[in-house]
Amino acid sequence: MIKTLVPPCEALKLPVAKVAGTKDSKKLKCKGLRMELTITQPDDWHLHLRDGDLLKAVVPHSASHFGRALVMPNLKPPVTTADSAVAYHESIMKALPTDSKFTPLMTLYLTDTTSPHEIKLARRSGVVFAVKLYPAGATTNSQDGVTDLFGKCLPVLEEMAEQNMPLLVHGEVTDPNVDVFDREKVFIDTILQPLIKRLPQLKVVMEHITTMDAVKFVESCKEGFVAATVTPQHLLLNRNAIFQGGLQPHNYCLPVLKREIHRQAIVSAVTSGSKRFFLGTDSAPHERRKKECPCGCAGIYNAPVALSLYAKVFEEMGALDKLEAFTSFNGPDFYGLPRNTTKIKLSKTSWKVPEAFSFSFGDVVPMFAGNTLEWQPSFI
Ligand code: DOR
Ligand code: ZN
């Protein structure tokens, strides 16, 4: 494992590839005391960029590491039409730093009244790459979401299968009688299983999976048709993190963190090299005052730390050779898009996560604020 490597690799006279746990010695170098990993530029397949001032504040963090991002549509009002997706795409492009090559890929917000025609328009727009299912009431700005998927949305889902337009799923039931920690499993049993039986040609991404049940479900489906995104928080934290030393609002997201056994199942799945899992940060910024209050919003702002954290997880599992497929290959392959051709470098250099990012409208607190992380990404 790289972590135990204190002297330079040369001094140990070990082949770099063996020390690093990667089979490709070209990708991992040891420069004196510093380890470096060069990988194809990653994409973020699940990102909240917001709009207005918050968009301008946070988009540079994603654009500085990722080539593309699939941008979630849960704005107020939500992005429910191809026209509004085109307009949102334009405002993101305007908010980007000059010279940025970051490409936002847009999504539509599915409602009970979305028409099959809107899916055709979305496909024709050239900027919409998926449709997001929020069960009504499941999470932030989901009040316009779907109340009855099979009763109201089957014609739209059929058109999506026809147009090869993936359905992205916030996989939680909203029944208040179902325990919040069981909502993902119940969603799989009552909605997802019947859905893929009914429409096996529809591509489905189970977003931000949190349980071993989700891992087993995705692994049981046909490869290339059902996949999952995985966040840094669901790889690194279990539900204790919400209560460690007092209530921790910056570790609160939805679906909520689960037990340690679930975290371990997700870590094993992504570091196994399976093509069914790919990077989706679910980076979800909220201004500090909306997190640290009597009824705080769900969402963890992880865009500035995400790549460092994914590298940490793969390193700790001795699976750095599998990192690049997870961050940069499995996502575009699933969506039928070309892989990025640019590269980024991950250097094993300590850096401190800021306590907060301050803007004119207030602060945004990142995941692991004030902590020291070990992997630092940069463009090459
Ligand atoms: O924690 C979350 N925050 N989960 C979601 O599904 C939405 C997101 C947000 O938009 O804040
Ligand atoms: Zn999300």
Image: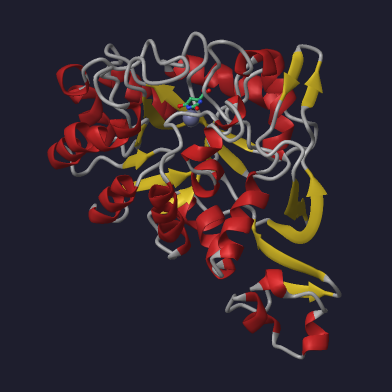
What's the image's color scheme?
Answer: secondary structure
Q: Residue at 74% of width from left, 43% of height from top?
A: 371
Q: Could you say which is closer to the camera, residue 75 or residue 116?
A: 75
Give the x, y percent position of residue 97: 78, 31
Give the x, y percent position of residue 41: 64, 53
Left or right of residue 237: residue 273: left
How many numbered discs sit on the rendered protein?
0
Give the x, y percent position of residue 359: 80, 18
- In the picture, the quarter occupied by the C terminus is bottom right
Give the x, y percent position of residue 191: 20, 32
Left or right of residue 319: residue 344: right
Q: Could you say which is closer to the camera, residue 200 or residue 165?
A: 200
Picture quarter containing residue 62? top right
Is the residue 11 above or below the residue 157 in the image? below
- In the picture, the quarter occupied by the N terminus is bottom right
In this rendering, does residue 333 appear at all?
no
Q: Residue at 48% of width from left, 22% of height from top?
A: 73
Q: Residue at 54% of width from left, 18% of height from top?
A: 297
Left or right of residue 78: residue 112: left
Left or right of residue 279: residue 276: left
Is the residue 277 above or below the residue 12 in the image? above
Question: In the current view of this chain or complex, which residue is farthest to the bottom?
Answer: 13
Q: Residue at 80% of width from left, 55% of height from top?
A: 350
Picture quarter containing residue 315? bottom right
